[in-house]
Amino acid sequence: MQLAHPHLRWKTGHEVSLLENGVQLFPALCAAFDAATTSIHVEMYIFRLDIAGKQLLHHLMLAAERGLKVRVVIDGYGSAVEDETIAQALRSVGGQCRIYRSEPKHFTFKSFDFMRLRRLHRKIVVVDGNVGFVGGINIEDDYSTADPTVRATDARFDYAVRVTGPIVLELTEAIDLLWLRLNKSRHLHLKHLRTRLRFFKRQKMSSHVASDNRSHSPINPPAVTTANMRAAVILRDNLRYRRTIEQAYLFHIAAAKNEIIIANAYFLPGGKLRRALIDAAHRGVKVRLLLQGKIEYRMQYHATRWIYELFLREGIEIYEYLPSFLHAKVAVIDGVSFVGSSNLDPFSLLLAREANVLVDDAAFTTQLRQSLENAMTRGSRIVELTLYGHRPFLERIADGLCYLLLRIGVTLSGKSDRY
């Protein structure tokens, strides 16, 4: 699928592997940490010191003890409970850790600062500058043990990718730039300034080039791979890339001819995305949504259900995932796959730092599509319009109130005109 879009810098020469749930991601991360020879950089929204978190932290500390450069950035809200403990543990063995927007430890006026809503929600790991991991899976116990006697419920349903190839350089540049921004020193060293200028120069040059195979002069060139998969990385922040992920969805939905499958944990799209999905259904595109069926956060759950009727009446199919908490943020739109950290809700699309990888590869898309098909047919219930219309009165009230509260929150954030 040869599509052109100003924020999609497609590149060839990748090897991309799909990882489903922590049961596949966490062993892959531990193996990558143990095999690393120069550096490991981690950005994570939630880092918890449960069974999985302690195991991953242990492998990070072993890497730091071997003399590798280990840098970890964790979000101050998502990892608020144990952020300082994690930072101290890494620093004790020579690693580095920075906290993105630390939360106030006590109730203060800062507690009402809406800037607190701008979180580091992306989940990126880069090892040796050659291997990248991107997805929606946090570092927390995903019930990765196979022993059902110690498993409270099924794993959160989520995805990540392991990738080698040119886009790893873009991931490296993004995490390096954020690391510099989090530098608490008041004096910006000359070498840091040069790195920053080099980054912006490359970004400016890339915006004028449409070829898939642009030439770069990276400090650490990406690993040579015999694979030739086509991929792109899309970042979202609150400065230069405010609407890139939303625009990528809009672009591919508008171009869709056959099928759209979106699996999203927190699904509350703005007006443009809603209209795009409805327009696609009117064109004869088969549109299916896989959404949360097991309640994790009541407000988001009920707010999403308030907009079901809008889609159901237009022929869009909605499935609610029931075996466990749905945490996926993926999509299959004809031959292109979206995998990343961004939900289709105001938090992800308007406020948070996010990272998605797009893969234009038939085999990869078939694998992801089959996984989503299995989730819809074996572990989900389809929402029927007639039954939805007869849900209890109090449930309708809850749906409407939660939707109204979230809309008020968007208004207070100052982003209502864009949603």
Image (tube, rainbow, N blue to C red):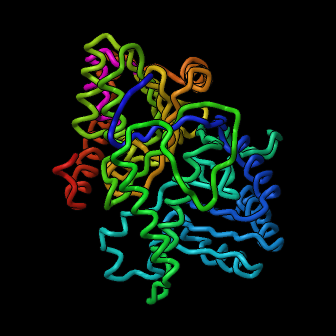
Magenta residues span 304-317
Which residue sits at x=48%, y=43%?
214
Q: x%, y% of residue 345?
A: 35, 45
Q: Is residue 167 magenta?
A: no
Q: Residue 116's image quarter?
A: bottom left
Q: Is residue 175 above or below residue 389?
A: below
**Residue found farthest to the left:** 417
Q: Is residue 314 magenta?
A: yes
270 to the left or right of 320 = left
Residue nearest the viewer, comparing 313 with 369: 369
371 to the left or right of 110 = right
Residue nearest the viewer, comparing 238 with 417: 238
Q: x%, y% of residue 219?
A: 60, 62
Residue nearest the viewer, comparing 41 with 406: 41
Q: x%, y% of residue 4?
A: 35, 32
Q: Is residue 214 above or below residue 218?
A: above
Which residue sits at x=79%, y=46%?
150
Q: Quadrant of the N terminus?
A: top left
> Is residue 164 among the parts visible in the rendering?
yes
Q: Residue 24's image quarter?
A: top right
Q: x%, y% of residue 104?
A: 44, 79
Which residue sits at x=40%, y=13%?
258
**Residue found farthest to the top:** 284
